[in-house]
Image: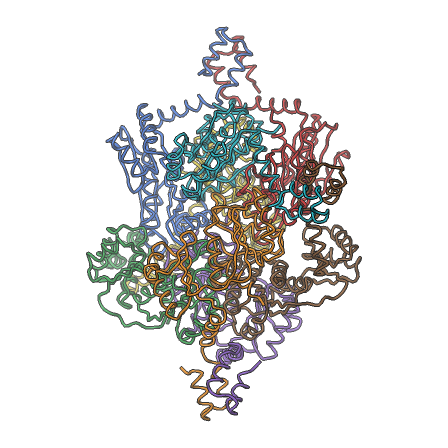
Chain colours: A red, B orange, C brown, D green, E purple, F blue, G yellow, H cyan
């Protein structure tokens, strides 16, 4: 396929007229090379590999994608991986680290030095899978994390015991199901941006996490922004971007 | 149609046998006199008058109901009263106390000695009308109240400053809009039953109080039960019943 | 970690200055010791143990928590326990009482004398699991209960047959699915506070209990407050708090 | 425009061939004459005129429709009529009966003898406009009605006082807002079909009548069918059809 | 507690005066015996047996209820019966008729003469289970039925082919999923009352029958009332009541 | 601002090197000129002007946009124009045609020859404003229209009377509120694509057009696609695109 | 059964009088013959066979329908076919082509020449089953298709690479889950009508495709109409109708 | 009220024993002084004043709050201020800057040097009020902003023209109503964190911004987090926190 450069060169060399070159330029896939290049550039610059969303992909599809990425020397993180697909990945890539709780598979070639500091705070034990997805993603992207589990507001002393450490983080991820009140309380106590993750933990009028989502998005505390229900990956990704702000 | 009295008289007179009378009694319209009597009994016993729900009633209808109740010597509380109806009530009953904020009109003959103790805690300034409806209702029903306004979790120190006083109440009413997190935090700190009132304070994905309602009903803290959005009256009524448990 | 006491002692002993001690106190986990003590105090005072929410916890996690609590001599109630986890608990603690219907496991060292009186009223046979969760919880917390099952308003004579007994309770728990009308009818007949539990019993436009929840929260009867769909535990906990109001 | 009869006559008279007649018949507005005739037949037979849905129509449009119907000697009922349109109708047709509460205008030439018997039962005073729409519609269609207002389940003795009379009706219309429990209770006590009308009376989590609608459609009592929120007209129309079943 | 009988006896014996007895009677548990007697009366009068809602009941519970009813010589219909429960019923009562499609079990002692005429119209093949539940229920209650399946409006000629027969029914049950338009079209063509049953047939934005429910309840045609999603039993029960109007 | 052409020319002329030209090309607003050119091309080719969405724009903003477009000789259609803005437009452009019903303002320089044929079918009188918006938009875009108003399925003979004419259209727009059943019925009778427009006409459980929207999107008839509630403009725009398919 | 023709002939022959013939004509199934004839005509004219919606039909029912259609020489497409039903079809019709991904079974006698051109664009890999249903349907109906998978807006260069080819299609089907933004972006770039299919791909606040559906129906781009969630068949059917516009 | 300091001093002075002091410390309002000090510290450190949420507060309440803050020398920003309250503020503080579009009032004593860089991107003209609230808030908090209005995806070239400038921002705020697709497209093109603000711009199935909210929270692009509908203030506040991450 032609590139901007080859077209310009052809024009320069007289192999194309201006009109022909103009047409050629305009019919280029619009952002294609630029973006691919950006992507490659990002990888070279940051050492961060691709993240594969495993839900709805077959074990075979996942293994093909992972193989393709590995063949280009990239680190790979697969999220929402099924048990079956995880087994398939591990069979092919014995070095893969599988987290059953977080439903992730990670293959990395070398340990990165982690920077920044992301606090991951959860309300209850059942929010842990989402928190683990966030932690593994953040570390894959190169961010240092510290986890503070089971700090729900029903016993606010649990939060009090760790709030000073949480305050030291550059970004705070708050993960909570049920009524999701933890996000408001934490945001009222820290000065860092808070990324809130509603979880589907709960029952009845929880409606699969809708209660926590609405709660968090209506937070009376300033400094809270939210991602999708159970989206630990997304929270970590946002935290990484914030950590990377220069 | 037969009446209890006519049946009994027939039995007395031998016009009916016991079995026949029993059948006749049991097929009577069910609860009629009994209940009216109970109602009167309650008033005599507790000194509590009737509460009139003013929404959707015309000034004239309200004045007629109030007059009827007053003519039987009863104290009256009208809730959700419109400005127009309030003016009409005051014109006819100059002794009526009108609260514009709470949208109530109260007419009482004598001060009652208030007992029990109900704490009314609100998250923000805008929740005050609901809190006032609760306070006025509780006092009308005979309960002592103490109000703690503007204790939202975004600045949890505001709550901390008063939590010890709140702990002393027999019942706690928590009134909050937006994400309603205050209910969970308070319930985690006190040993009294907490009645949570979601309010319609907020905007956007608040959906008229739905966010706070779902939040409160999914509270991770034990000891929270809820009433309808903006239902300050209902919260106070429940608090009164709890206060009256013997 | 430092405690309030150790700090004060250090100040007293001259090992700290006032300013240093003040800083130390203020940086303590805020409610920590206080709350733990309160918790312990509650147990000593009331003999009530911890309640473990079993949903989303593995059999192993549950067994660990139960063991930890038992090792401190506490009584334990696990709610929403899966069949698997129940079997695991029973294997380790043969004295555990398992209720399959209520999905609970209870381990108590000695029979408590139950006080107060909580009426548990259900609309239909299918609401029984929720009612059993409420009954077992209430008794675990130390409340006397009396159950009135299958009193749905479609045949109001079933309610009439027991209403006088219900009236004698200090608190009434009404459990109903479908349209949840029973809560309004009962609340119109009794003078105790009514805690309504919508259940997910029903189909079609019931939307998993939403219909009953909306119905109950819009009750035209005074004195009704509600808890989450199927939350028998929560209703009993509230009832216990009300029973404990002094 | 041609009619089935004129075509057949033309065929009979030889003015059309079979093929031409077949085409003509098939190109007739399909149900047109039949339906018009049915309509006329119904009017002649039952003396019932047309009902005009006034919402979203201008005073002028309404007056034109009314004039057209009156010019054919028909009785007319306009529902959901605005104050302005009602004034316009009355100016033109001074004999029109306007009900402000029910938002109806009725013009009838002669009193009909009403038959059947429709009981109209409401939960509260605020449901009266819907009930009046139902009553006026039913009487316009030729049904005898009896109204039982303010029978809400919060004070079930109010219902008990009139239940025997309600039982005598051929059809029962139950009109209730808030939680709409009245429909279930009435249906559990009568043997006639119950048409339930949820009303938008209420606030907060009532969501404009949705709570009552869901409640009624999930009724645990047999024999309840429902119409749209505030649709007093529809309930009366259904009642009329049931009354007319032969 | 006193009983009606003891009170009457006391009156008879002169131990109570009329006034005292009247008070005593009125404070009795309300509807108890009376209603049970009414129920028995209904059975004797109409020959209709009890209907058991099988959902959420164990095979054993169902068999116990069926046995109890059979022991009193009653006919029994169980709806929403699971395959397991159906097998259990058939094992105990080999004469039971099981409909797998309709999920019903019927045990009747003698054929009744069916009267009235109920048309059951469905939109598509997949609505048949609901239609069968309606048909079996109607016949159990003593109503003649005629079924018109697969008349959906997408091919309106299918409806046209049978509309004349449908018009002859006293009551029409219209059963449709997806957008439920069939109810409006049929109601526009017949003079009988139409009971519409939304079904959960569909996918995507159908939301389990909500689309059809909203469609039917907003019908632009007069004479439609609705029951719950998939509630074939309810539709038939309403049809029976209408058929029974005298 | 530079254009692709000027860059290429500069390269050709030696005013830029390849690398500089490459950067310049890549930093161009990506689709800018291309799209503007397409837009101009479309206007030249089709004579169709711009459509301005008037909602949420001030009269002044609208007049500025209209002036700008008119100054380039373009025809202009403003939809959802407020009465105030319409007055402002007419004051400045006396030749503007205002439709109060459709809330549109149209300024065109010359009559276009309309092609294609779009049938616009409405269920009821109240759907007319949406239909008028569709009609005016379609004609503005160059499509011939024919309107068939008040064809709701409650009286299906009204549709039958015109169905043959509707069948002749290339595209059919069906506009209906309430339950929106008309879309399914029409789509079952015609062979053209049907664009369905749910309207907000209705009340109660109509929820502002949601009922009609869900109904239409679940249509059992093939060949229906839908646009937003009350979006007459969108339907006409789609119809125009279909008409323009070559 | 009588036909219009036979009736007319009988009239002509004097075997019927005008009145009798009129009755006979009016009692004919209304659209019956006409429509059946149209249907047959369509098949003969277009060579398109019937499409069977497989969901909710048993393998046996499906095989019976397929057999019936095949016996009349028709091509058959079954959509939403279960694995079991697909196996049953293949056993009976070994020539059937089964697509597991698209859940379709196709049996065609002869290859048709495909015309028109439908572009099928998907946002992500997981949308492929819906896309395959659309592709297979379109080709079954006789439309040429070209598929562009995995063009989601998160990496807009993927779309840019193929947009020129997409622009050449007569109709564009855009299939996207999650937030469905692809529909707006594509519609802003092409001049063909865009049929958008929201898919249920996503999780959390996606609510089974509702997010994508609302997104698409609120598209800020002109020229988008939508079909039901996951309705690949419907999109293709609409595309076919548009392709067939003459 | 006692302070930590006074208690410590008393202990030091021997006026209290350790145990008494411990009790006194633990019964202090928990976070009170600490937090107030923090707040004051933040102001001194960052020069940022308080922000007052004006909705639901009376002009008088707002003026009192503003006066109190001004008397402490603080800068003040009032958001969601009504026209009336704005007039009242301006009357009292003539130096206040009022933005009618953004509904804000700002009173600042001295110009701050703005740092960081926040890009504010909107989809359409009607999103401007929300964007202005964001811009004014960001600048009040000390952040440099650059606004890019009217970049909706329907004409993606508008975005392309400015994307390079947007890429240079440290944080990007994307504000969009209707289907909110802009957030996904921008997040796919930039490397900064994107804070998405759904707006209530739209109609019909937009449901007051719900469509945009769901769209944004389901974004297929990484790096998007969201705030409440129309919450320009919240977005700016988050952006400020991110900008302030050290």
Quadrant of the image containing the C terminus of chain G = top left
Check the image and report above or below for A41 versus C151: above
Of residues C144 and G163, the one nearer the viewer is: C144
Instruction: Say whether residue E215 is left or right of residue E90.
Output: left
From where the camera sits, is residue G99 visible?
Answer: no
Check the image and report above or below for B144 versus H146: below
Residue E87, x across and y down, in percent: 65, 67
Of residues A28 and A75, the one nearer the viewer is: A75
To which quarter of the image does residue G151 belong? top right
Quadrant of the image containing the N terminus of chain G = bottom left
Q: Residue furthest bottom?
A: B14
Q: Residue furthest top?
A: F14
- Tag count: 0
Instruction: Say whether residue H71 is left or right of residue C201.
Output: left
Instruction: Say whether residue B74 is left or right of residue H241.
Output: left
Residue A36, x across and y down, in percent: 60, 24
Of residues C139 and F127, the one nearer the viewer is: C139
To which quarter of the image does residue C54 belong? bottom right
From where the camera sits, is residue H122 visible?
Answer: yes
Residue E88, x across and y down, in percent: 66, 68
Of residues C78 and E95, the one nearer the viewer is: C78
Residue H232, x across and y down, in percent: 48, 35
């Amino acid at each position: 396929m032609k590139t901007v450069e080859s077209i310009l060169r052809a024009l320069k060399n007289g192999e194309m007229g201006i009109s022909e070159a103009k047409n050629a330029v305009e019919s280029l896939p619009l952002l294609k090379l630029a973006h691919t290049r950006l992507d490659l550039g990002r990888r070279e610059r940051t050492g961060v590999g691709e993240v594969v969303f495993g839900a709805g992909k077959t074990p075979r599809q996942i293994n093909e994608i992972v193989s393709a990425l590995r063949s280009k020397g990239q680190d790979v993180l697969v999220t929402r991986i099924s048990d079956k697909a995880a087994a398939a990945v591990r069979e092919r890539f014995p070095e893969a680290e599988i987290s059953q709780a977080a439903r992730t598979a990670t293959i990395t070639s070398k340990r990165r030095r982690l920077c920044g500091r992301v606090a991951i705070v959860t309300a209850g034990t059942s929010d842990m899978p989402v928190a683990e997805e966030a932690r593994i993603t953040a570390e894959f992207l190169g961010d240092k994390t510290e986890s503070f589990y089971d700090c729900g507001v029903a016993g606010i002393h649990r939060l009090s015991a760790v709030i000073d450490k949480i305050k030291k983080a550059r970004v705070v991820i708050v993960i909570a199901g049920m009524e999701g009140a933890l996000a408001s309380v934490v945001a009222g106590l820290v000065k860092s941006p808070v990324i809130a993750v509603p979880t589907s933990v709960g029952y009845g009028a929880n409606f699969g996490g809708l209660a926590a989502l609405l709660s968090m998005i209506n937070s009376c505390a300033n400094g809270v922004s939210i991602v999708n229900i159970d989206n630990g990956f997304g929270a970590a990704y946002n935290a990484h971007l914030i950590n990377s702000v220069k």
